[in-house]
Image (cartoon, rainbow, N blue to C red):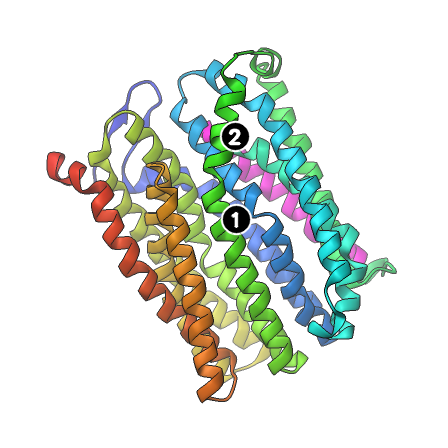
């Protein structure tokens, strides 16, 4: 086991240290995904139209959230690079709040126009009614999530992973309690998809207040936010512009997801689309390790690059990938057991779940390499690989639809083939970006 300490920040590289550093994020994200899964399970006991439609609702939400996620990564990257200089962080954080507020308001205007103009026949009149009646809850959730992301980027950039884990744990529990209360106890006169959006909004508001409390408790809020610097607007502008490439890629990806769910609603009956939606929720659980280790490794990659310690890249990448793979496989087999207990054995669904595990392992490698390129500000590669994945997936699905009977197994096979193609491209670019570091220093052992 290798242990390596950097300056006063006690940043350590070891299998145990990397795992413990990521554990709070892993726990919070798995709880959030479990909430999505629990929502899907709860909806599965309602009419199939709700579970069949929630995929469209989630895809629209994530599409309009794409810029927020990109901004979160960009500002977190900046905060991590200036870990030792609180003032450099402080004079950027305050104006960033304005960016995280204006963008979601504009996004919601486009969202309402989109819902108003889309022909109901595109998704079916019953599905459109569910979407239309949920529109205001969806807008509220988007705005609240952006504000939450602005503070989340700061906490994560400062390495407050444990704090974020505890906050997420509490808010997810609240979300779960409210979901059960509103859906089955009070039985609110709101469609179930709207209830899910409402409970998520309340949970995010709670998270915002808790994160603000953390700042106040540490007695750093007033001097931290009152710092002024004439370069702040320019830095915020640069960080915002650097988010455009990742935003475009994620935006295009989620447009592809919307098209995919439209495809399912057109070719599948609601029961089959509901099963596919449930499988996608399972996939969310299995790929949590990739997302969690990707998020925390951004701090490692950014800090090492800023300190001219790029030779540590291959070491941390190896540790992160091994952790991610082991945990993903464990989650996958647990879900297989859970599904068989709850719904009984289904051969096609079993094959799909095994395929999802393989997809998650490949996706883990894709996410970690993408994160390393973002840390080196190679966001154009991130854009290209996402577009490759999206267009490839749509192409394979179109081919399967043309030459075979539509089936959700074909969709997952298309994802697998697209990931392989994307990894071939991204691995080549990774070698170009990190080649000099590897030759100068060699891998650590």
The residue stretch that appears in magenta: 155-182
Residue 70, image x, y percentages: 50, 42
Quadrant position of the N terminus in the picture:
top left
Q: Residue at x 33, y 55 (%)?
A: 365
Task: Work out whether residue 342 can be spotted.
Answer: no
Mark 1 vs mark 2, CA separation in Å: 15 Å
Viewer-closest of 186 and 278: 278
Q: Assign a secondary structure to mark 1.
A: helix
Quarter occupied by residue 216: top right
Where is residue 248 shown, x and y percent of the image? Answer: 50, 49
Q: Residue at x 49, y 83 (%)?
A: 401
Does 363 appear above or below 152? below
* 166 drawn magenta: yes
Residue 244 forms part of the magenta stretch: no
The image quadrant where one finds the C terminus is top left
Q: Can the viewer see residue 228 in this picture?
A: yes
Of 408 and 8, the residue lying toward us: 408
Q: Position of residue 177 (x, y in %)?
A: 72, 51
Which numbered disc, 1 or 2, marks the residue that appears first in the sequence? 1
Q: Is residue 340 above or below residue 56?
A: below
Q: Which mark is residue 155?
A: 2
What SS does tag 2 mark? helix
Q: From what the image shows, is residue 155 above or below residue 85?
A: below
Furthest residue toward right: 189
**Residue highlighted by disc 1:** 29
On the rendered structure, is 11 left or right of 205? left
> What x and y, as percent, mark residue 84?
40, 18
Could you tell me what secondary structure mostly forms the magenta stretch?
Answer: helix
Q: Which mark is residue 62?
A: none
């Amino acid at each position: 086991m290798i242990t390596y300490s950097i300056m006063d920040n006690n940043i350590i590289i070891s299998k145990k240290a990397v795992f413990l550093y990521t554990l709070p994020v892993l726990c919070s994200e798995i709880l959030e995904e479990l909430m999505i899964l629990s929502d899907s399970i709860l909806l599965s006991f309602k009419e199939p139209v709700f579970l069949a439609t929630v995929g469209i609702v989630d895809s629209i939400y994530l599409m309009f959230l794409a810029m927020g996620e990109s901004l979160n990564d960009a500002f977190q990257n900046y905060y991590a690079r200036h870990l030792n200089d609180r003032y450099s962080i402080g004079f950027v954080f305050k104006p960033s709040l304005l960016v995280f507020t204006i963008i979601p308001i504009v996004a919601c205007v486009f969202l309402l126009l989109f819902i108003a103009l889309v022909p109901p026949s595109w998704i079916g009149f019953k599905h459109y009614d569910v979407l239309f009646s949920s529109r205001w809850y969806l807008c509220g959730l988007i705005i609240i999530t952006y504000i939450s992301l602005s503070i989340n980027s700061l906490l994560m950039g400062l390495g407050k992973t444990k704090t974020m884990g505890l906050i997420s744990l509490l808010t997810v529990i609240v979300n779960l309690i409210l979901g059960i209360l509103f859906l089955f106890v009070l039985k609110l006169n709101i469609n179930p998809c709207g209830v899910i959006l409402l409970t998520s909004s309340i949970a995010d508001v709670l998270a915002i207040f808790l994160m603000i409390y953390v700042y106040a408790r540490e007695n750093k809020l007033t001097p931290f936010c009152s710092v002024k610097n004439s370069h702040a607007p320019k830095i915020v502008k640069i960080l915002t512009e650097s988010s455009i490439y990742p935003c475009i890629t994620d935006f295009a990806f989620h447009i592809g997801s919307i098209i995919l769910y439209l495809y399912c609603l057109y070719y599948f009956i609601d029961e089959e689309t509901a099963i596919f939606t449930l499988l996608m929720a399972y996939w969310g659980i299995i790929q949590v390790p990739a997302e969690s280790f990707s998020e925390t490794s951004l701090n490692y990659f950014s800090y090492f690059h800023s300190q001219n310690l790029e030779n540590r890249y291959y070491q941390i990448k190896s540790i992160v990938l091994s952790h991610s793979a082991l945990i993903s496989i464990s989650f996958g087999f647990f879900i297989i057991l859970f599904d068989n207990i709850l719904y009984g054995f289904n051969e096609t669904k079993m094959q799909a779940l095994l395929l999802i595990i393989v997809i998650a392992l490949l996706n883990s490698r894709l996410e970690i390499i993408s994160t390393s390129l973002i840390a080196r500000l190679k966001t154009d590669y991130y854009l290209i690989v996402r577009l490759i994945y999206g267009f490839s997936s749509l192409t394979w699905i179109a081919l399967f639809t043309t030459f075979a009977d539509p089936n959700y197994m074909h969709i997952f096979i298309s994802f697998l083939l697209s990931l392989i193609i994307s990894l071939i491209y991204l691995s080549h670019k990774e070698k170009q970006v990190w080649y000099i570091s590897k030759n100068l220093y060699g891998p650590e052992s």
